[in-house]
Amino acid sequence: MATALETVVASVIMPDREGRFSISLRDGRIAEIEPERHDGSSRAWLALPGFANLHAHADRTFTVTSFRPRSFADALAASAKARAAFTSADVERRATIFLQRSVAHGVSRVRTHTDVDPVVALKSMEGVLAAKRAMAGKIDVDVIAFSTSRNDLAEPEAVARLRSAIALKPDFLGLSVNSSSDPERATAALLDLAEQAVLPVDLHIDEHLEPDKILAPMVVKAVAKRGLGSRVTFSHLCALATLDKSAASALIDAIAKAGITVIALPETNLFLQDRSEATPRRRGVTLVRELLAAGVKVRFGTDNVRDWFFPFGDGDMLDTALFTAVTANVDKDAQLLAGLCDGRATLVPGDPADFVLVPASSIEDALARRPAGRIVFKAGRQVAGPSVT
């Protein structure tokens, strides 16, 4: 607290080093991190980079209070029926609540798939973009114009609808690849639009457990042919876990060579995949460890929050990290944190001062308790939690 432009946060612990530290913030960045002598008379805070929820559906959040889908298809049907009643104002209200709760949990960035289809037209886009404006300065929001399963880009009218969404200035384009009547044509249409608009792409792909229906190899080839790999993300990729070792390794190597990022979504995939009257036998989570071993960037997201696809959650990425650690056995703290914080595994001088102080003694303690009362900084300014200034 030396000047109006400098803040010093004292008595923090860090996941990759011993002892306690003080963090100096200046002009929206981490200026210095220095060891601190301490007599043990006060508790320390676990300092972590700001969490990045790289797959959410803010427009659908908080739409159910009590619902259990019988299957993935049942969730889709319930979603379409309910979304027909959406208004832009309703979406804005719920999306804003979701973003506010995300900030309180320590999330600095959200990437949200925002529905574009005949059911909602552009209402979800309008509502989420309004919520993004309302939360500016507290959280970064990347809005994906998401061509849902109801907007098949193999059809000209669906392409025209997505083009109208592009006029609203989204940050990404998205597509539900497997739901198309002609996935190759739909993929080409999306990539054409992405190149024309100079936008990155985040695809819902292979959100199923049928190895003979996997489309990722086709999409990898299409992306690599255009040299777009660094601008493409695969979300879900559940079916990768159903392939034999040789086929899985070949696909993973192709993804790594293309430079495609993969988003793992353990909560919703565990809840929905293989869902029927019997206990699920297949876990539905992509091959996180194998992807990491091949050098693929793997990130995490909450996916759905209290909607027809997942009626639980609150936008807390520590919940997602716990699910990932348990189901995918991501045991290395640096890998878990990189997935949780969009590549940042610790705080480094010169980085943007987007970070969260968790009242916990270690990563394990933070995951075990997911404690409330976190202190959250965005661009060097405190945006949530008890005051430290």
Image (cartoon, grey):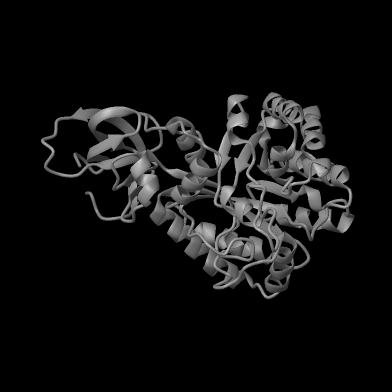
Question: Could you tell me which residue is drawn at 10 percent across and 35 percent down?
Answer: 39
Closer to us: 212 or 148: 212
Residue at 50 percent across and 43 percent down: it is 326
Q: Residue furthest bottom?
A: 85
User: Is the residue 6 above or below the residue 266 in the image?
Assistant: above
Residue depicted at 68% across the width and 75% down the height: 85
Residue 121 point in image, percent of width and height: 74, 65
Q: Answer yes or no: is residue 9 visible.
A: yes
Viewer-nearest residue: 56 or 310: 310
**Drawn side of residue 358 relative to residue 211, left or right:** left
- Residue 199 lies left or right of residue 180; in this view the side is left
Based on the displayed image, in which of its 4 quarters is residue 75 positioned? bottom right
Q: Is residue 150 left or right of residue 172?
A: right
Q: Nearer the viewer, residue 211 or 308?
A: 211
Q: Is residue 50 above or below residue 133?
A: above
| Picture coordinates of residue 368, whole percent (x, y) | 38, 48
Q: How many marks?
A: 0
Q: Residue 162, percent across and down?
A: 76, 54
Q: Is residue 65 left or right of residue 209?
A: left
Q: Quadrant of residue 28?
A: top left
**Quadrant in which the N terminus is drawn:** top left
Q: Position of residue 61 (x, y in %)?
A: 56, 64
